[in-house]
Image (cartoon, rainbow, N blue to C red):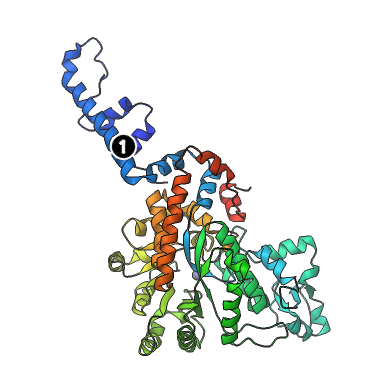
Amino acid sequence: MIPPSGPERILASANDVSEVIPTLPGVVAPHPPGTAGVPARTFLVPRCLALFVMMWLVGALGDHAQAEGFDGRFEAFKTNASPGDLYRFLYAMPKAGDLHHHAGGSWRMEDLYTVATNRLRNGGNRFYTRVRAGTCPEDDGKWRRFTTLAKFTFKGLSACQQAEYAPLDELTPAQRMEFIDSLRLDRPGEGRTEFFEEIWPRLGALGRSVEVFLEMTVETMKRYGAEGVRYLEPQTIPMGFLLADGSSVDPEDFHRRLAERLKQADAQATGVVSRWQVVVLRFTPVAEKHVEMAYDFVSRHRDLWVGINMAGREDDDKGHPRRFLDVYRRMRLKHSGVGLAIHAGEVDEANPHMRDTLLLGATRLGHGNNVLTDDDLVLHLRSKIAFVEINLVSNLLLEYVPDYSKHHFAEMLRTGIPCGLSTDDSGMWDSNMTDEYMTAVKEFNLTWPELVACGRSSLEWSFAEPSLKKQMIETYERDLRRFEEQFSNDEWKVRLGSVKPVSYGFARRRWNLSW
Ligand SMILES: [Zn+2]
């Protein structure tokens, strides 16, 4: 924790103003040690000076509190609040947008199990998950527990292979919990190999079922809406979705289904608006072709689709940013106004990925972990040419930082580089947006203006169309004022007690919080 500084901190920590005075350079204390019995007149000047300084300090604090409004209240609250009360407060506060958000990775896995095993919500499908290693001649040698198949694929297996799977809706309670846990990083040392190489492939057919996808989109919006998030920019690949019978869903049809699902009452009731990004897996041999398809798709569906992202392990150098310079330049010859938010700097070592990603035209960079290894880049970013999407929980769980003292967030935020908090894959972290805010406050001592700036900039740097952006910013400012009023009057403790946060394993493991 970085302690607060300045006169307000000195006053806040002192029981009495007289304790403060000796700490100021050049000022003599009212009763310096060893002065007992010395006539008071001797100290007339120092006393006056001390009084002046005291009045100045009190006056300055008054001005400070008046000028910064809620800031002072938050500082006092933050200093004294229990972790539980701080979490309640942060859960309830308006949080604007989550700009770095992978659909699928953000799903709450308990919800996924519920949806995937309900034939009224999963398109009449049935899913089968692998529960035992086998010795069938057809086995390809890769044994991954809880790899999940749709019914049409399962039916195509030999009887020997089918015996390796269990219907998802017939798992025992213990198996069900194991299945859910297998889709998230909840154990020490699982790290990025488990995440990239096991969890995403394990999601398998569940991630490609169009019905499951649409239902989980709304379930996710409900959870984010409950904690004060109002805007999401989920990343997904609109190609490759399947119906229950195994037939493919045309990207146009996927768009139509998504738009319709988002108009339904339960989606609208979440209070969350979404605009979507097409994500391209950067290391595949056909990634350039996919960038072209993404441009074409976004350009034809601008009511919902606003940008392109590139994701995938950056330490797989087959997907390095420079490889794509030609295709992005060609696409700009014919397409205008397609947002580019690209993962960059999600690596351990120094490399030119972030500056090369700026060259691709990106105005938002995902993660930016190695930014401080490039002085020129830091100076460029300070001129506000791009926004860095900070993912605190992700960076810790995937071990891109050993601890937060090595994280770049505070340096960026406090040197004027545009940045904000986002979740990346909250479902797979067993986490939520409040955990990002809580981590920011606990680890970097964020002030109220800094927290608000994170929220506000997540809307300002979104790819939402101007009218929506304007409306969301106005709503955010209104909600913020209302929130500040609620926590400024004498009823704030009652208000805080009425907040019922929903938090998950990350908050339980890190701060021992459960409700
Ligand atoms: Zn990401």
From what the image shows, is residue 443 above or below residue 12? below
Place of residue 235 in the rendered image (x, y in percent of width and height, measured from the top left): 52, 74
Residue on which disc 1 sits: 62
Q: Quadrant of residue 170?
A: bottom right
Q: Quadrant of residue 268?
A: bottom right
From what the image shows, is residue 247 above or below residue 232? below
Q: Residues within 10 Å of mark 1 (few under 14, many from 20)?
A: some
Place of residue 445 in the rendered image (x, y in percent of width and height, measured from the top left): 42, 48
Residue at figure coordinates x 43%, y 65% from the top left: 471
Place of residue 285 in the rendered image (x, y in percent of width and height, measured from the top left): 51, 87
Left-right relation of 413 to 483: left
Q: Amino acid at mark 1?
A: Gly
Left-right relation of 265 to 99: right
Q: Quadrant of residue 258?
A: bottom right
Place of residue 99 in the rendered image (x, y in percent of width and height, measured from the top left): 47, 67
Residue at figure coordinates x 56%, y 64% from the top left: 191
> Taking the image as drawn, is residue 3 in sight?
no
From what the image shows, is residue 382 above or below residue 91? below
